[in-house]
Image (cartoon, rainbow, N blue to C red):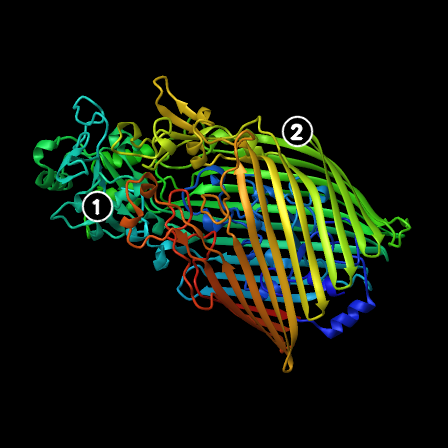
Amino acid sequence: MKLNKIAICLAIAGCASANAAQDEQDEKKIERIEVTGSSIKRTSLEGDLPITIISRSDIDAAGISSAEQLMLQLNIGSNSNDGLGSNTGIVSGEERGNNGASSANLRQQGAGSTLVLLNGRRIASHGLKGASVDLNSIPFAAIERVEVLRDGASAVYGTDAVGGVINFILKKDYQGVQLNAFTDITQAGGGNINRFSILAGTGDLNSDGYNVMGSVSYKKVDILRGSDRDFTNTFQPNRGLSPDTRGGPFASINNRGNGDDPTNGNYNLIGTGLIDPNNLDAQGNPYANNVLNVLALPGQPGCESIEGMGVDTGALWNRENETHSCAWDYPRAAVLQQPVDSIDFVSRATFKLDEDTELFAEVIGSEVTSKKIFEPNQITPWSIGSAGYYPSTGSSYNYIVDALSDYYGADQLNIGAPIAYRWRCMDCGNREIETTTTSYKVQLGMEGIIGDWDYKAGISRSSNEAESELGGGYHYTELLAQAIGSGAVNPFLLAGETQTQAGMDAIEAASARGVTLYGGETTLTQIDASISGDTGFELGLGGDTIMVATGIDLRREGYKFNGDRRESENRPAIYGAPFDNGNELDDVHRDIKAVFVEALIPVVDSLEINLAARYDHYSGFGGTTNPKIGVKYQPMEELLFRGAYSTGFRAPSFNQLFNGVSEQPYTGSDLADPASCANGIVDVSNPSCQPITPALVYGGKEDLGPEESKQSSFGFVWAPSSEFSFNLDWWEIITEGTIQTPNFRDLLENYETFSGNFLRDAQGNLTGIDMRYINAGERNTSGVEVGMQVNGQLGAGLWDINFNGSYLIEDKKKLLDSIAFGDNLVGTHSRGNIPLRWKHTIAFNYTQGDWRHNVTQIYRDSYADEVPAGVQSGAISIGEIENYNPTVSSYLIYNYSVAYTGFDNVGITFGIKNLFDRDPPFTAHQNDYSPGAAFDPRVASARGRAYTLNAEYRF
C-alpha cells in the first residue's frame, strides 16, 4: 500500500494528508481498477509507467477553473502557443487560424502528439484546425479527477500518444443535488472569472439498479487588456525592447518607388525619400529618411503628444536611418486574456442488469464563445489601393507641408502631390474575431465481468464545430480607400482633435462586422471493445498468474472546412481579414482500424513484465505496428524500479496534408537576401543587404510522411516509511520525420541546404519563402522528473509536503538526416515553444479538524532572451543598450488556500493566487508573431494577485 499512495500525488499542488481510517479501509477492500496507460485492471496503481492522478479537491484548492489553467501549472506541460493567452494577436504558421482553441502539449512534443481522453475514450478535435482536442470544450465543473500518464502509450491507445496521455474522468454516479459557485477576482482589475454549476442525480445502482445524473455549468471569463497592466509597456529601448511599427495614430509619411515621377501612380509628397540635412551616418553622409513622422521634427509637439506613441528606436530593428520616426505601442493594445463565455452539460444514465453487468448512455455537450481582440489595422495606401492616398488639400495637408519645409526645405518636396503614409486607424477600433465552438459526444456502452474476465464495449459519435466571425475593426477595402482618399477621414489629427462626423460615418459605412471568416467541423465515430482478465497460467518461477487484455478500435475521423461564406460573385475585399479560402475542404475522412493485445507477466513476486502491441491501419497511409515492453522490479516493499520502451507513429493531420497554399507578406524590416548576406542579416551600408519583404508561403503538402518515434523511460520509487517517499524518472523521446513548419531562422542559417525554399523571379530576386510543412530529420528530447512527499503530525493536525519537479536535459533537432544536430534548445527563446530547463512546485498542506490550509510555491526557470535584430546584425552593440539583460529572469510565485468543511452540506474554499503580487519577468522578445508585450504568457500569468472563492452546497 505504501507505493500505491505515491501514484496519487498531485503534480501541481500536493496530496491530501495521510488518514489512518483510509489505510484500514484499503487493507479490507482491495479491488482491481483500470488506470490510464493500460487496459488490464490490477490491484496496484504503481506500474511500469509513471502516472499522476489529480483529484477534484486538489483542483479546487489550487483555484483552477479550466483545463487550460491546469495545463499551465503542470510541470511536464510545455510552455507553448497552445492557449487563448498566447493566441491573441497576429499569428503565423502552425498557430494561424487557431481561434478559440486551447490544447494540451506534454514534454515539448506538440499538441498533435498529446492524446486527450474523456472517460478513457477519444473525442473529436477542434473544428477549425482538426489537429488536437479543444480543452475549452471539456466540462471542467463535472470532473472527478484527471489522470496524466507521463509517458508514451501508443501501444495501448493509438499512434498519437507520443508525449503522454491526459484522461479527464467525469462524475459517473451521483445522488442528490449539488450547487457550486466559483469566482476568481484580480486585485488590479480585469480578467475576472466566474462559474456556476449544478449537479443532480437519483437512483442507487446497488439497491435501485440504476442511476441517472446530470450537470450543467456556466462560466464567464472577463477581458484583460494590455493597457490594464503597467508591465506591458514596450517602450523600453534601454532594455532592448521597442515596438516595430511606424504606423501610429498620427500617420507617418512614407516614400514609394518612383515617387518622384509625376506620371507614376506612386507619385507622392516626399517622393523616394528626403535627405536629412542635420544628421550624418558613420561615413559622414546625410541620412535618407524614407519613413518619418512630422511630430518628431524639431519644433513639433513630439511623438509622445499622442497617447501610445513614442520615439521609434529604429537601431534595434536595423532602421537607424529613420532618424525622425515615431512608433506606437501596439502590443499594449492587445488582449492578455480573451473574454470567454461557455456553457456545458453532462448527462449519464447507468443501469445494472445484474450483479456483474452495467449498461450506460452518456451525452456531453458544450458551447464556447471567445473573442480575439488586438490592435487596430495599420493602413497604407499601397495596400488599400491608389485611391487611398491622402489628398493634397486642406489644413492637415498644409500643416504637413509646412513642417517638412521648415526642416528639409521645400525644394525636396513634391508639393501638390498626395501623401503616402502609414496610419494606425484608431477610429476604426480594435480588430475583433469572435469564435463560437459547439461540441457534443454521445456514448453508449456496456461493461461487466464474466468469471475472472472484465469486458467493456462502446459506440460513440462526437463532433466539434467552430465558426469565426469578424467583429469591429475590419472594413471593406474599397470603401476605406474612398473615405481616406476623399479627405473625409483624416490620418493626421493632433492631440485633442477628432474625426468629423462625416469621417466617422464613412468609417462605419465601411465596416465588415458580422461577416463569417471561416468555419470547420471535425467528427469522430468510434466502436471499441476490449476484454481483460486472469489466464490462470503461471510461469512456474514463483510469480502470480498472467493477466492479458485484447481489444479492437474502429474509428472514422472526418473533417470539413469552409472559408468565406459570401456568394462567390459578391465578395468585396475586407482589409486585413485573414480569410482562409485556399484551405477549404469538403468532408474529407479517413478510417482507422486497430487491434491491440497486452500481457502482464509476473515472472517472480518481485519482477513484473508488461508487454503490449498495437496494429493501426490508416486509410491513405497503410499499417503500423507499435510494441511496448515495460518492467517493474520491486526487490523489497520499500523500493520499486520501473522502465519501459515503446514506439509511436503519428499520421499528418488533415490540415497538414490538404491546406491550400496561401501567402502572407513579411512585415519586418530585419530581413535581407541570405544568398548575398550571411544568415539574412540586414546591413544598410551594403547595397546587397538591404531590407526585403518577400511573401511567406504557407499551406499543406499531400506528400507528407508520418512521424515515427521511440520512447524510453527508467526510474524508481523509494518509500522507506509511510511518512516519506521519493520518485525519480528519466525519459527520452526520439522522433524521426517530425512534421513542422520550418523555423524561419533555421532556413536562413542553412541557406545552402534549403535554397529550394527561397522562391525567385526570372531576374533572381527573392519573392517568397516556402514555409510549408516538412518532415524534418530528427528530434531528440529527454528529461528527468522527480517527486518527494513527506508527512507527519503537528499538534492536533496532520501536515504533508509534496515536491514535484521537471528537469529538461535536451531538446535538439536536425532538419535533415544528412546534417548535424543543432544546438540544444533547452533554456532558449523561440516563437513556438520555450523549453525551460527546470520547473517545480512545492506544496505544504496542514489539516486540523474542519480546516485545511495549502501553500504552494510555483517556479519557472530563467531562459535566454531573444536577441534584438539590431544587435544580431551588429548595427548596435549590447553596450549601447544601457540595461540590456540577455536572460529572462526566473518566475516564482506562491499561492495560498484554506478550506472549511464544518458546516453541514457546505464546503468553502478561499484562495489567494500570486500571494506577493509578482509581475511576470521582463522579456525583450520581438512582438510580431510572438505573444506578450514585455512579458511572455507562455511562462507567466499577467493577472497578478487574485482572490478565489469556491462555495459548494449539497442537499
Residue type indicated by callout 2: Phe
Question: Which quadrant holds residue 343?
Answer: bottom right
What is the quadrant of the N terminus in the image? bottom right
Q: Residue furthest bottom?
A: 795
Image coordinates for residue 54, horizontal then vertical, percent: 64, 60
For the point 39% across and 30% down, the residue is 695
Question: Is 762 situated above or below 900?
Answer: above
Q: Is residue 609 left or right of residue 514?
A: right
Q: Residues within 10 Å of mark 1 (few under 14, many from 20)?
A: few
- Judged from the image, the secondary structure of the residue bearing numbered disc 1 is loop
C-alpha gap between disc 2 and disc 1: 61 Å
Sequence-first disc among 2 and 1: 1
Q: Is residue 943 left or right of residue 883?
A: right
- Judged from the image, the secondary structure of the residue bearing numbered disc 2 is loop
- Residue receiving disc 1: 500
Q: Is residue 557 left or right of residue 271?
A: right
Q: Is residue 537 visible?
A: yes
- Residue receiving disc 2: 621
